[in-house]
Amino acid sequence: MKAKQRHPLIVGTFILTATGIVSRIIGFLYRIYLSRLFGEEGMGIYQLLSPVLSLSFSLTAAGYQTAISKLVAEQAATSKKPSLRPLVLGLLVSLPLSLACNAVLFLFADQVSASLLQEPRTASMLRILSFSVPLSAVHSCINGYFYGIKKAGVPAGAQLLEQVARVGCVYIVSSRILAAGRTPSISVAVLGLTVGEFASMLLTIAAIWPDGIPAFRRPRDSRRQPFHVPSRLSGPSGSALWGKLMAMALPLTANRIVLNLLQSVEAVSIPAKLRLYGYDTATSLSVYGVFTGMAMPFIYFPNALTSSVAVLLLPIISENYALGNMGAVRSATVRTVKYCGLMGFGCLGFFVLFGGWIGTNVFDSPLAGYFITTLGFICPFLYLDTTLSSILQGLGLAGHTFVMNVVCLLVRLAFVFLAVPQVGVRGFLWGLLVSQLTLGVLYLGCLYRFLQKK
């Protein structure tokens, strides 16, 4: 009698969620450590790097990771063994792009810090950050392969190792600087980020090595045997697979770049508009640092579960849709909406009741408590939107997702430019609530219409 097979979504979600929770606990404690070590203004300066990091990832890796995951999942649905071809082709594009991005950020850090980020103190940090881009590209593409074959252990382990290496590096370097009687710079945190990406890359390469690199080795007696390509690298012709990969990756990359550009405008504009409201530079950066470096990570903490579900839903939805199994697609969608919605409303109640206490006692910042309490109202839509986006992408509706996200960001930008100069940071909080509600309604409407047609 065969043992009952475990569902890959349940097993993978458990692995990613458990690892995600541990990583977020480490990251949460790390944020507290950084805020106490570098202060609110230092956190604000550090958070200004987020647009550059997000834009670099979107340009060099995000679309290729998703495309690799989808192609590997589709091929696994119709063959006994998954193919490594999508991973190899994805790396051939992603790695050169990331190296070029590395060079641009390193060489033009002064210009980027002054013109884009409007904060010259970020220049040295950008140079350190630039080396994390190719490291991130490599392990992201490899993670896409493992997500496609529904083996979440490697990406989960890489995520945990990255967090541990990052925190360990910052703690060791900062301790030595403090012991020498000097004050550590916020650049130490950027160094930790790069070291974490390096550790994560090494782990994913080690995991793929038995099936990847040795597969290209030529047999010892090359005179008598032709070059052998193992079955795991066989499959569709290279040109056909290349076309499919780029057809998936390029729209995703373009969409992510546009979205990140809008997010970059938003991130840079918030401190600027707060200055128009009446804050000085230090206060505006402090408010921005409290919001992005303290309150938002706490709100996103429960998203460890929904993010895990979202990552694993994409290949499962893609596989079932490719096989025409719409019953499984509908079932996964209904369960996702139900349980993510329930979790979101539960978190809403928790943050509204205890947000003030958390801000005062955990971060020693009443402002953080105000942000957490207010942001609690976006939880039902924030957690649901994460998984709905993944479902829509798995159904081939990435274009629809892009348009809806642009609408959401334009709503937020309108509040930043029109409301923040008049009412301060409350204007941005209102915009965040309205935009998240709008995005949730648009996602549900699009998904409902698609499933009705099918």
Image (spheres, grey):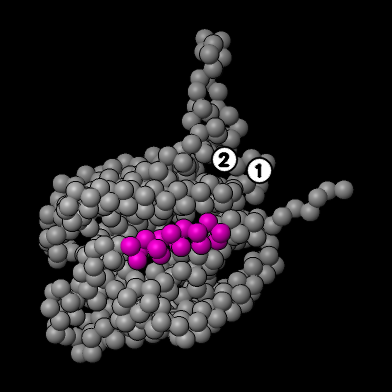
The residue under label 1 is 79
Quarter-of-image position of residue 327 = bottom right
Q: Residue 25: within the magenta?
A: yes
Where residue 397 appears, as percent x and y from the top left, is: 49, 66
Measured as percent of width and height from the top left, residue 377 is found at: 44, 84
**Magenta stretch: residue 403 in it?**
no
- Name the residue carrying label 2: 83
Q: Is residue 110 visible?
A: yes
Question: Tags 2 and 1 in contact by the CB under 8 Å rule?
Answer: yes
Q: Which residues are magenta?
A: 17-33
| Residue at (25% x, 48% y) in the render | 176
Q: Would you call the spot at circle 2 few (<14 residues within 10 Å), some (14-19), or many (20 or more)?
A: many
Q: Main secondary structure of the magenta part?
A: helix
| Three-letter code, disc 2 | Ser
Task: Specify few, some or many for label 1: CA neighbours under 10 Å numbering under 14, 14-19, or 20 or more.
Answer: few
The answer to whether residue 258 is seen in the rendering is no
Describe residue 5's horizontal placement relative to residue 339 as left or right: right
Residue type for callout 1: Ser
Distance, label 2 to label 1, CA atoms, is: 9 Å
Residue 434: image quadrant is bottom left
